[in-house]
Amino acid sequence: MPDERTVTSGGSSPEAAVETIQREMTAFARRARASAGRTHPELSLVSYTLLGHLAERGGCRATDLAAHYALDKSTVSRQVAALERAELVERRVDPENHRVQVLHLTEAGRRVLAQVTGSRRTAFRERLADWPEEDLIRFAAYLERYIAWSGAEPGEA
C-alpha cells in the first residue's frame, strides 16, 4: 500500500508530487468517463452529472446548468436534447415566468439516476473497502479542499 514516501516515482519533491497528482487525476477522470458508460450505456458522465443536479435542485433552466458547470450552452443543449429523447428529462413552463422553461427529471430519469448512483456507490465502496477510516476521511477532506479552490478558470481541473 503506498504511503507519503512511495506515492511519487520521481522522488519526494513537491514538483514530483504535483506531477503525480496531475497524472493520477487525469487517469481518474478517464476511468470515471469509462465507468459511466459501463454503468448505463446511454448515460455519459456529463449526462449523469446533469441529472444529479436537476434532482438536487428540483429542476432548473438549461442556462443555469451551463453556468453551474462552466459548460458551453451548446454542449448543455446537446446533452439535454439526448436526455429528452431518452425520456429522462422534460421541460415545463415556469409558473412564475411563462417565457422560461425549467428542466425536470421524469420518473424514468429518477429511476435511472438512482440505479447509476447505487452502482457508483457500490463501486466506490468496493474500491475503498480496505482503506482505514482515517485515510477515507483525509482523502475526502483533500478532495473537498481541492474542488473548493476558486482560483481556477472555468473548465480547468
Image (cartoon, helix red, strand yellow):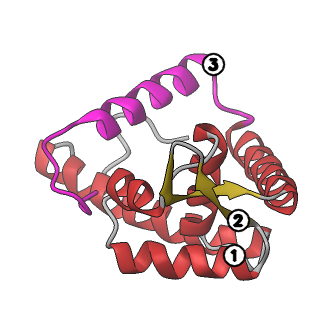
Specify the quadrant that holds the C terminus: bottom left
Circle on res. 133: 3
Q: Identify whether 141 is placed above or below 149.
A: above
The residue that mark 1 highlights is: 84
SS at mark 3? helix
SS at mark 2? strand
Q: Are marks 1 and 2 in contact (CB under 8 Å)?
A: yes
| Front residue (pair 20, 66) | 66
Image coordinates for residue 74, horizontal then vertical, percent: 38, 80
| Front residue (pair 22, 29) | 29
User: What separation in Å lies between label 1 and label 2 (alpha carbons)?
Assistant: 5 Å
Please give the count of numbered marks on the rendered protein: 3
SS at mark 1? helix
Nearer the N terminus, badge 1 or badge 2? 1
Image coordinates for residue 32, horizontal then vertical, percent: 57, 64
Q: Quadrant of residue 145?
A: top left
Nearer the N terminus, badge 3 or badge 2? 2
Amino acid at the residue labelled 1? Glu
Amino acid at the residue labelled 2? Val
Query: Looking at the image, which residue is at 19% across and 38% down?
Result: 150
Q: Quadrant of residue 66?
A: bottom left
The residue that mark 2 highlights is: 89
**Highlighted magenta segment, given as a residue range:** 129-157
